[in-house]
Image: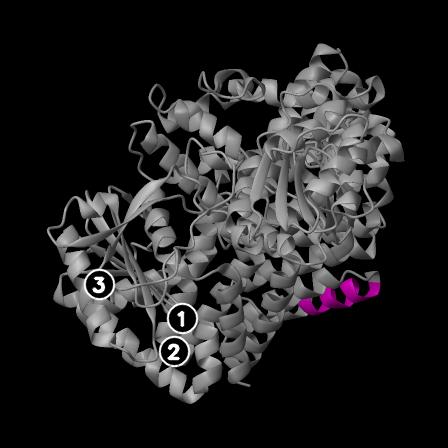
Amino acid sequence: MVHDAGVHTDLPTGTVTFVFTDVEGSTQLLDELGPGTYAGVLAEHRRIVRESSTSYGGAEVDTQGDAFFLAFERAPDGLDAAALIMERLGEGPIRLRIGVHTGAPLLTDEGYVGGDVHRAARIAAAGHGGQVLVSASTATLVDVPLRDLGEHRFKDLRAPERVFQLGEGEFPPLKSLHRSNLPVPATPFLGREHELEAVVALLTDPDTRLLTLTGPGGTGKTRLALQAAAETADAFPDGVWWVPLAPLRDAALVLPMVARALEVSEQPDIEMEVTLGQALHGRRMLLLIDNLEHLLPEAGEDLGALGTACPTLTLLATSRERLQLQAETTWPVPPMSETDGVRLFVERARQAGVGLALDETVRELCRRLDELPLALELAAARTGLFSPVQLLDRLAQRLDLLKGSRDADPRQQTLRATIDWSHELLTDDEQRVYRALSVFAGGCTWEAAEQVAGADPDLLQSLLDKSLVRRRDTQHGPRYWMLETIREHAHAELERAGEVTACESALTGWLRGELERRAESLLIVETEAIGWLAEEEPNLQIALRRVIDARDRDALLSLIESANSYWMSKSAYRQGAEWTSAAIRLTEGEHDSARADSLRRGAFFARLLGRYGEARAWLEEAIDVAHVSGDVLGEAKALQELGRFVAQTDSERDRVVALFERALELEEAGQATEHDRGITRYRYGASLGECDDPDGAMRELSEADRLFAASGFAYGRTMTRGALGWVQILHGDLDTGLALSADALEGFLQAGDWDGVSRGLGNIASGLVRRGQDSEAALLGLVMGRIDTELGTAVAPAWQSEVAKIHQLVASLPDADRDRLHADASSMSRDDAAHLAIALCRSLQ
């Protein structure tokens, strides 16, 4: 449990005493009292807890259901508050159990972090209704009689701790860990509440006989399995037992190791599974078999035989691949969530003596480490030497830099050792496919794995089973991918084998073929094609870098042409600018259509990013090159791009008209497609709207809409509605303009075109300003500005007067209202802002 410091800012720091309260048997009590009565009783209980805590200076950190998490600066105050709570509840229907523990947690922006928080919760959970349990650390700080309950080991798996009880009441034995050889981990378990809940639910399901946690080295399989085993101890009255197999190299020793852990003696001339079956007959216990993969398949067969011989036994295994047994349930262990990963990193750094601010650098470092527990822990161990910024800078050498402590398992001395261990177990063919798959930066489809990496179904399945490759289902079919840490290892193997160039060339060839096959769909921004390329976009980056390094002009221009609609529809203008600039450099000194196209595309992205001088120079050169080379349609495209530029920067209507009319003449001569003529008409209309010619704008936009309908360019019609809506708003028809703008915004949102969403929010904000709905207009305008900043897009001069109205509106508000508005705009998601704007427009119809 952590506290959101953004809500409460007065929490104690340094040495803090935590008080956890929990209602015993709340579900049963609800059934007995009924919902109405129970709600009243619970409300009274909450009032008592809060008033008692406040009377002793306590801070309410968190409330979850009927449980409270309280913090006190002094241990006596925390214990007195606990006593007062119990006294005031008396013998009423609510029976609380309370745990009190003192420690020195870290208070971050996201709350209390550290094992002391979890320790207090564990102590409370071990008690019974009406009982107040006190840790040894708190007991030494208070001067009241406490009853010594002896040493107990709790489900957080830490070493036994002496526990005390406030008062002389008689209660059943504490619900502490018993009949177990589970090891004491070097560090406390942090985060992963959802994963732990899922594994515990499976283990306690009567139908689960064998559960295997799978995942690559460093994912935290063992730590999660140990914690889940501890959590389920109450369900296994005959104990939970741990059998580590990492040291073994002979599968024949697996069952003898199980017997040794359970103190079962081997019997001469009797199979070990029979001996174990006789010894464990009727006993309900959980057996954790840890690190099994290197002993498969023989070890799996032996465990299957053990499960058959002991039907009341539940087996929990950790392995980098599934055991492939009939009774097996597999559960792939994912990387940690971003929140849990950051918590783990910060806490491990604190344990290493380094206090870290929870900032974006730390978050980015954890993301770059794939939120992989082993990677995070090894990195945190280096914070005594390197700052998070330095660690982030050195991630290129991550596999060699991050070394474990001396007492770590030898396989985990470095991440390289951990992953190498899995790699060494592969066959030659598996190693070949493993390293070839590393060429994919964004994962791959089965077809790509087959064509580029030479995979076949058996080899790919084997790598999946060994957790070196993962699968996820997408709208475009299954994709196969590696954790980045593993991919880096595989790519190092690819380099060592001298196969990088061949694999990158194969990837480029495969991707060009797929792009050509989808060329028409990409041109009209078909949802399926754009979604497919979004999945392949990291691989596109690999291919683009490859052809630039090879100075393969034709391949570069082909890839850029195919990706252009994707970059535009996804507002990926920085990417488009980066690669088209590379094409301009690569075609330097040439005078053909390829050069003209590169210049024109580069100018388009430069304009959107506010690099106007660059855009103007490139467009003038593009027109000259296309004209000299006789590229009629290329010249038309360059002319209409210059027309768009002039409209947005200078608003010179006559020059805009001249440029677009000449472009239309050339398109007629060059027999341009309906799609391309529709684009020109759309851009002509939008430009006339910005030059204060509403009649001309609506004429051209209507023609564009007709051409888009004829060519099947549905997204073009969304663009047209957006431009028409803006023209109508600008010239007074607010109802029609807002309705059209809402329709367009819906289309932009569905397509994921965030620049379109931003422009749509701006259109609607301008309309609302004219209707006098100032607060709504200001909110949408601020969100629009935030999106533009996030995308890196510039506000064109033609739009600046409208943006200025929003800024003036915000500036005129009282300080409190202005601060609230900025806070709302900062926290509102793009989707929520779009839905709000659409709803506002719909409410006016």
Give the residue type at disc 3.
Ala
User: Is residue 665 positioned above or below 739 on the image?
Assistant: above
> For the point 60% across and 32% down, which residue is it?
261
How far apart marks 2 and 3 lie (CA) works out to: 52 Å
Q: Which residue is mark 1?
A: 777
Q: Earlier in the sequence, mark 2 or mark 3?
A: 3
* Residue 748: image location, x then y, percent: 62, 61
Task: Give the structural element (helix, strand or loop) at label 3.
Answer: helix
| Badge 2 vs badge 1, beta-carbon distance below 8 Å | yes
Q: Which residue is mark 2?
A: 773
Question: Going by the image, does 682 lie left or right of 818?
Answer: right
How far apart marks 2 and 1 lie (CA) works out to: 6 Å
For the N terminus, give its image quadrant. bottom left
**Extent of the magenta region:** 701-710
* Residue 40: image location, x then y, percent: 34, 85
* Residue 302: image location, x then y, percent: 78, 34
Q: Which residue is mark 3?
A: 82
